[in-house]
Image (cartoon, helix red, strand yellow):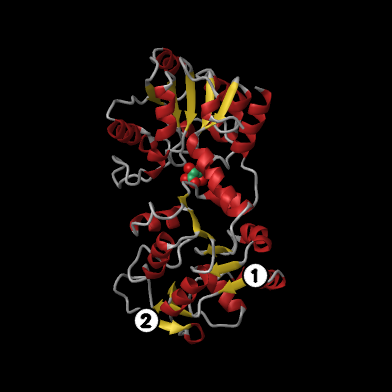
């Protein structure tokens, strides 16, 4: 796969696919988390510094092929302009004659942002005509959008068949590198901390990784399903009854492979998920029938800390509790802080875990925070991302 450093950018129109699918304020006027925007700045600076003309393209949300004003990239263009200290205009669309004219008028070192790709149904359908229309704006295609590279969409996959030169941006390269270091040739012991709401969304990942890890820590609401499978009462907590068998099979597989599994030994329960609701810590065998589990408890966290402190590589995905609602935030933030202090190679992925690490002030301290959500999970499932495969194929041909 070619990288940015291996292609001639001077004077070229460089179509830079980024993932600016970022959270916006309630009034949708401003960006509330700009990690994904900052992540592509090195690639953008390289293109501009090499005399390239940067044509940035992204989706925002899921407007389903309709031009819906609240999904406009306008606040993103404003945010990017502010960070760069120079105006990055937003085109009124991402294809068409007007856009072509704007791109033709770009001078070396200048940049423009195209309007939301998903305003066109052809984007998600990976429609060849739409891919061709996008490709008309490019001499070089650069994918720096790891977080959407699991989607075989026109601007991620289709376009690579219609441009002469393709390359991976620095952010995409960094993501793939961190993933390889953590999963392909890890320093052992290798721990996976997997949490979040549902087992059902993590089955593929667990099946793929159990044979490769040394320690498995299970937290979040998904732990309830494992606890119930082991015969514990979990009150009125979120449980996937139709996945009790799956949970049992996964635990069996871990035992066969000699993987140590840590499940909660105590939990934080409350009658409801209201701020200030009377929360208390109970052992897992004493969850009241009318209570719900919203976080793992301090004894569990002590056991997790102790086990993780022996590991040299730690991968974390999913919050340990309902971390947006105090007092159920504790375990998630404690884990984030612990990973920040750890000397292991630590990789965090998924929107919630990444945001917890950020809020805990540990984002600069962990080894790597992925910008991906679904893409990160698909990598952990062992899948090849279509966007990455397309770059590899294009590089082979050019
Ligand atoms: C993400 O936020 O995970 C990516 O931008 C992909 O978005 P999607 O799930 O709407 O395709």
How many numbered dots are placed on residues in this image? Answer: 2
Q: Which residue is mark 1?
A: 259
Quick one: label 1, few (<14), some, or many (20+) residues within 10 Å?
some
Q: Residue furthest bottom?
A: 286
Count neighbours of disc 2 (C-alpha within 10 A) and say few if under 14, some if 14 to 19, many if 20 or more: few
Query: In the drawing, does residue 26 fall left or right of residue 259?
Result: left
Location of the N terminus (image quadrant): top right
Would residue 316 be found to the left or right of residue 278 on screen?
A: right
Q: Residue at x 60, y 55 (%)?
A: 186
Q: Which mark is residue 223?
A: none
Q: From the Cβ of disc 1, is ligand 1 less than 8 Å away? A: no
Q: Secondary structure at mark 1?
A: loop
In the rendered image, the quadrant that contains the C terminus is top right
Give the label, 1 or 2, closer to the camera: 1
Seen at 38% across and 64% down, the residue is 333
Say whether residue 200 is left or right of residue 79.
right
Residue 51 at x, y = what percent?
42, 18
Q: Is residue 192 above or below residue 262?
A: above
Give the numbered dot on residue 280.
2
């Amino acid at each position: 796969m070619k990288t940015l450093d291996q292609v001639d950018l001077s004077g070229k129109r460089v179509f830079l696919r980024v993932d600016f699918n970022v959270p916006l304020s309630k009034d949708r006027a401003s960006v509330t988390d700009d990690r994904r925007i900052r992540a592509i700045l090195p690639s953008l600076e390289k293109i501009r510094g090499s005399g390239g003309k940067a044509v940035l393209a992204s989706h925002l949300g899921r407007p389903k092929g309709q031009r819906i004003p609240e999904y406009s990239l306008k606040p993103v263009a404003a945010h990017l302009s502010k960070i760069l200290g120079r105006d990055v205009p937003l085109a009124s669309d991402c294809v068409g004659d007007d856009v072509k004219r704007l791109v033709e008028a770009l001078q070396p070192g200048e940049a423009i942002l195209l309007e939301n790709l998903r305003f066109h149904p052809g984007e998600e359908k990976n429609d060849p005509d739409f891919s061709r229309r996008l490709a008309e704006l490019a001499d070089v295609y650069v994918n720096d959008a790891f977080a959407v590279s699991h989607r075989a969409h026109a601007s991620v996959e289709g376009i690579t068949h219609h441009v002469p030169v393709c390359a991976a941006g620095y952010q995409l390269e960094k993501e793939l590198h961190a993933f390889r270091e953590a999963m392909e040739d890890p320093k052992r012991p290798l721990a996976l901390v997997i949490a979040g709401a549902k087992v059902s969304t993590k089955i593929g990942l667990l099946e793929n990784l159990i044979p490769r890890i040394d320690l498995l820590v299970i937290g979040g609401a998904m732990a309830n399903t494992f606890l119930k499978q082991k015969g514990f009462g979990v009150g009125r907590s979120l449980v996937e009854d139709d996945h009790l068998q799956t949970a049992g099979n996964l635990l069996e597989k871990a035992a066969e492979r000699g993987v140590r599994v840590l499940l909660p030994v105590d939990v934080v329960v409350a009658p409801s998920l209201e701020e200030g609701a009377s929360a208390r810590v109970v052992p897992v065998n004493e969850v009241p029938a009318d209570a719900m589990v919203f976080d793992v408890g301090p004894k569990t966290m002590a056991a997790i800390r102790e086990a993780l402190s022996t590991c040299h590589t730690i991968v974390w995905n999913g919050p340990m509790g309902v971390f947006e609602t105090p007092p159920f935030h504790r375990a998630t933030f404690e884990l984030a802080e612990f990973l920040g202090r750890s000397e292991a190679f630590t990789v965090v992925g998924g929107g919630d875990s990444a945001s917890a690490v950020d809020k805990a002030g540990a984002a600069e301290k962990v080894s790597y925070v992925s910008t991906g959500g679904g893409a990160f999970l698909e990598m952990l499932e062992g899948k090849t991302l279509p966007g990455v495969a397309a770059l590899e194929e294009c590089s082979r041909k050019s």
